[in-house]
Image (tube, rainbow, N blue to C red):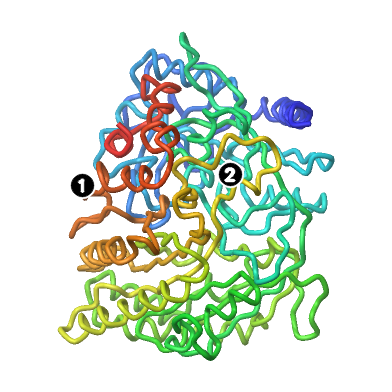
Amino acid sequence: MTQFNRRTFIAATASAVAAASVVRAVPAGAVPFGSADTTIPAPPNFPAGIPLYQQRYQNWSKEIILDAIWTCSPVTPDDVVRLANWAHENDYRIRPRGAMHGWTPLTIVNGENIDRTVLVDTMVHLNGISVNPASSTVSAGAGATLEAILQQLENNGLGWVSVPAPGVLSVAGALAVDAHGAAVPAVGEVPVAGTTYGSLSNLVTSLTAVVWDGSAYALRTFDRSEPEITPLLTHLGRTFLTSVTMQAGVNSRMRCQSYTDIGWRELFGGPGASGRTFEKHLDETGRVEAIWYPFTENPWLKVWSVCPEKPPTAREVTGPYNYIFSDNLPEIASDLIGQLTAGNTFIAPAFGQVFYGTTVAGLAATASNDLWGWAKDVQFYIKPSTLLLTEGGGAVITSRANVAQVIADFTQWFHERTSYYQSIGQFPINGPVEIRCCGMDDPADVVVDSAGPPTISAMRPRPDHPEWNTAVWLNVLGVPGTPGMFAFYREMEQWMRGHYSGGWATFRPEWSKGWAFSSELPYKDAGVIENTLPDTYRAGVPSTENWDTARATYNELDPHRIYSNTMIDQLLP
């Protein structure tokens, strides 16, 4: 069945390529190869027929920006094979590029010499999608967006139980960093076959990558039953996927209710606390997110629930991104951001109050306190135009029974530390706290024969602690350039790693966000990068399937390290 699905996908892709092959123009704003307007040396002997152009690169938070880097857009998987062999023969590196919706320098490193690097934009052509209803699977090119994939699944009565908030992500980019949603089973909930509460990586049934075959780079398909696939399911950019096949389940209608009238002390109460707590909502629906703006009392709580019939009070939606106010900030908010970036950090309390007020007013004005529609339409809510902030934090892996304690401990620590800094006239943090939960990459969720969970996914289960069935995501956001922000993130990261340890929990990074903080910058603590993080993926898992075996697989499949950069060289030498 998997083979049939792959053939269907290849046929669909070939048809799309035939239609598109006559149009190999460069994107708007790019400078094509051969133009007199290029400003950087051209790569030598570049493969003919693959569009090549000089283009700007900018990550999500605008903290990694290059005015010009060579970028290409292969039309077929065979083009990627030619690129890989060209890179090997000419001592170049190629970095797959998707939606650029990320913080971590897994594509480009600030200050890195990129004279011998070419970005490969997968989203222009490698974006075909084919659904096989008979096997409840979808096959997609590396550059297909999550939104487009979910729409095709929806058209066939299928879906995923949990998805990330931004639908713009390319599927290959999402898998590279174990993208996840905000769902665990509600008390008494029967999971839908074909879905998972863990990362999207746990949905993969097969994938195709360009890897070294002993004499050259070539396409190779890995089924979920092959041991070599597990490191590729979450790979941090250390390989190049051209397509994936993923399982799905019966689609569902969902409701999303917003609350802005619950005080943070009540909401984040400890285990068994009375009131309208995070724990209570999680037990009832399994799908909860809290956004707590700085120096405010009441977080914005979103509660999703499976809801086959439209409630009378709910507004039906037929598409995603229904919080319009979050993408159209009032002038006062824009002015405050300008003051923050200018170094006037003392306005952080006013900034938080404005965003809380904007949320309350926006929900009311757009009738968005109670939404109902297909699952993806109430789960996708972050657009590229949403406020660009940087993030620090990560996942606390623990048991479901400990979730309330994890959240209570963190929010109390955060409140005490920000209050202390406020008392001495410092405001290193000015963005919201985001709190979500999801399940682990449970092998039982996979409907085909599986060699195991994604090796270095943050949601990879710990066999020595089978009760650790939940990932609690604790993230803090801030305006890029805020003085003292990275020092605060370093303090927070070290506290989280020390506090959530021992027999009740462990702490793991969110690969797409900030980690390994020095006092000045993220990704600069060599001890964390070279020792602490690898040890996180050695503890409690078999030595036959851990960080070291994953690294060995990457080096075997790409011995010439054409899929790497200086950051990855340090993390995965």
Residue at 57% x, 72% y: name it: 288
Q: Earlier in the sequence, mark 2 or mark 1?
A: 2
Which residue is under mark 1?
527
Give the structural element (helix, strand or loop) at label 1.
Answer: helix
Q: Which x, y percent locates residue 498?
A: 27, 63
Question: Which three-letter amino acid code belongs to the residue tagged 1?
Answer: Gly
Q: Is residue 496 left or right of residue 235?
A: left
Task: Check the image and name the residue furthest to the left.
Answer: 424
How dense is the environment of label 2, judged by Cα within 10 Å: few (below 14), some, or many (20 and up)?
Answer: many
Which residue occupies the foreground of this view, 557 or 345? 557
Which residue occupies the foreground of this view, 275 or 233? 275
Which residue occupies the foreground of this view, 162 or 24? 162
Residue 415 lies in what quarter of the image? bottom left
Q: Is residue 553 visible?
A: yes
Residue 362 vertical position relative to residue 342 in the rendered view, above or below: below
Question: Which three-letter amino acid code belongs to the residue tagged 2?
Answer: Val
C-beta proximity under 8 Å, tags 2 and 1: no
Quadrant of the rendering where the C terminus is positioned: top left
Task: Check the image and name the residue furthest to the top.
Answer: 215
How dense is the environment of label 1, judged by Cα within 10 Å: few (below 14), some, or many (20 and up)?
Answer: few
Residue 404 numbered mark, or none? none
Q: Is residue 287 left or right of residue 564?
A: right
Q: Which x, y percent locates residue 265?
A: 42, 88
The number of numbered badges drawn on the structure is: 2
Residue at 51% x, 71% y: name it: 401
Quadrant of the rendering where the N terminus is positioned: top right
Q: Is residue 19 visible?
A: no
Residue 427 vertical position relative to residue 529 in the rendered view, above or below: below
Q: Which x, y percent locates residue 477?
A: 37, 68
Q: Which x, y percent locates residue 98?
A: 51, 42
Which residue occupies the foreground of this view, 78 or 469? 469
Which residue is under mark 2?
171
